Amino acid sequence: MSRLNEFVENHEQLDTINVILKHYGVSAEFVAETLTEGFGEDKELPKELVEDLKQFNASL
């Protein structure tokens, strides 16, 4: 599978997860906090991503 196809497939999967979360009324604050906690342990992810999630969560 080409990288472009992987990108498209990943975006489609993220859209599907978003629909499910919205359907069940999961708050953005909960998702941002959960991602921040989970990603904070992962040293392979860009620090910018973790910082952006923390900033987003603080704005809620």
Image (tube, rainbow, N blue to C red):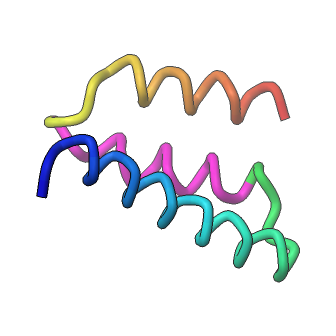
Residue 7, image x and y in percent?
33, 46
Relative to 6, 40 lies left or right? right
Q: Quadrant of residue 4?
A: top left
Residue lying at 48% horizontally and 66% vertically, measured from the top left: 13
Task: Please check the rendered image and state whether residue 35 is part of the magenta-colored stretch, yes or no.
Answer: yes
x and y percent of residue 55 in the render? 64, 22
- Check if residue 20 falls in the magenta segment: no
Looking at the rendering, which quadrant does residue 18 occupy?
bottom right
Q: Is residue 8 left or right of residue 4?
A: right
- 50 shown above or below 12: above
For image coordinates 69% across by 28% down, the residue present is 56
Of residues 13 and 49, the one drawn nearer to the viewer in this rendering:
13
Please tell me whether the stretch drawn in magenta is mainly helix, strand or loop: helix
In the visual, does 42 lie left or right of 12? left
Magenta region: 30-43
Q: Which residue is at the front of the view, 1 or 50? A: 1
Most distant residue in the top direction: 48
Residue 1, compared with residue 24, is above or below; it is: above
In this rendering, the answer to whether 33 lies above or below 58 is: below
Which residue corresponds to the image point at 82% horizontal and 82% vertical from the top-left?
24
- Quadrant placement of the C terminus: top right
Image coords of residue 21 (percent x, y): 73, 72
| Number of marks in picture | 0
Foreground pick, 42 / 19: 19
Which residue is found at the position 18% from the left and 43% from the top?
3
Residue placed most toward the observer, 56 or 19: 19
Q: Is residue 57 above or below residue 21?
A: above
Q: Position of residue 20 (x, y in %)?
A: 71, 78
Q: Quarter of the image containing the N terminus? A: bottom left
18 lies left or right of 12? right
